[in-house]
Image: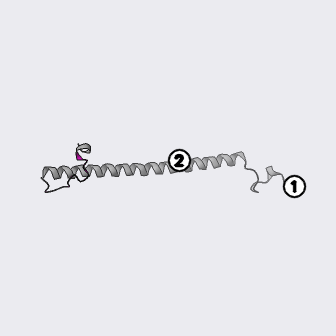
Amino acid sequence: MTDIKSCAGCGGPKGKSNLIADGLWAFLLVAIFSLALGLVGESDYQVAVDEQRLYCQQTLLFKRTGGQSGWPDYKGIREEVCE
């Protein structure tokens, strides 16, 4: 009969150090995943801000040029959103 303590790598119960290592890997995986989601979310926000800025610039140009240039306020939000 084989002693479980001396049977390293034979599928027996995990030692304390293996559990700590597994927990560390799980923590690192969750941290990396959270960081990636945070970066993607920030990128989406920045794209939305840039699009709104462009919309405001173009609708203001449309208003100032009497419709010769720029975009009409097709969303109907210029007065609320643009400064």
- Whether 68 is among the magenta residues is yes
Residue position for label 2: 31
Q: Nearer the viewer, residue 12 or 77?
A: 77
Query: Could you tell which of marks 1 and 2 lies nearer the N-terminus?
Result: 1
Instruction: State how many labels appear.
Output: 2
Residue at 81% x, 51% y: name it. Answer: 4
As shown in the figure, which amino acid type bears the numbered disc 1? Met
Q: Residues within 10 Å of mark 1 (few under 14, many from 20)?
A: few
**Residue 1 relative to residue 17: left or right:** right
Residues tagged 1 and 2 counted as in contact (Cβ below 8 A): no
**Left or right: where does residue 12 sit relative to residue 60?**
right
Disc 1 to disc 2, C-alpha distance: 43 Å
Q: Residue furthest right?
A: 1
Q: Position of residue 13 (x, y in %)?
A: 75, 50
Among the 4 quarters of the image, the one containing residue 7: bottom right
Q: Is the magenta stretch mostly helix, strand or loop?
A: loop
Nearer to the camera, 47 or 79: 79
Rate crowding at label 2 as few (under 14), some (14 to 19) or many (20 or more) other CA atoms within 10 Å.
few
Secondary structure beneath disc 1? loop
Residue with the mark numbered 1: 1
Q: Where is residue 47 in the image (x, y as percent from the top left)?
A: 34, 52
- SS category of the residue bearing label 2: helix
Question: In the image, is 33 to the left or to the right of 43?
Answer: right
Q: Quadrant of the C terminus?
A: top left
Q: Residue at x 64, y 49 (%)?
A: 22
Taking the magenta stretch, the answer to whether it contains residue 9 is no
Q: What residue type is labelled 2?
A: Ala
Query: Where does the magenta region start and end?
Result: 67-78
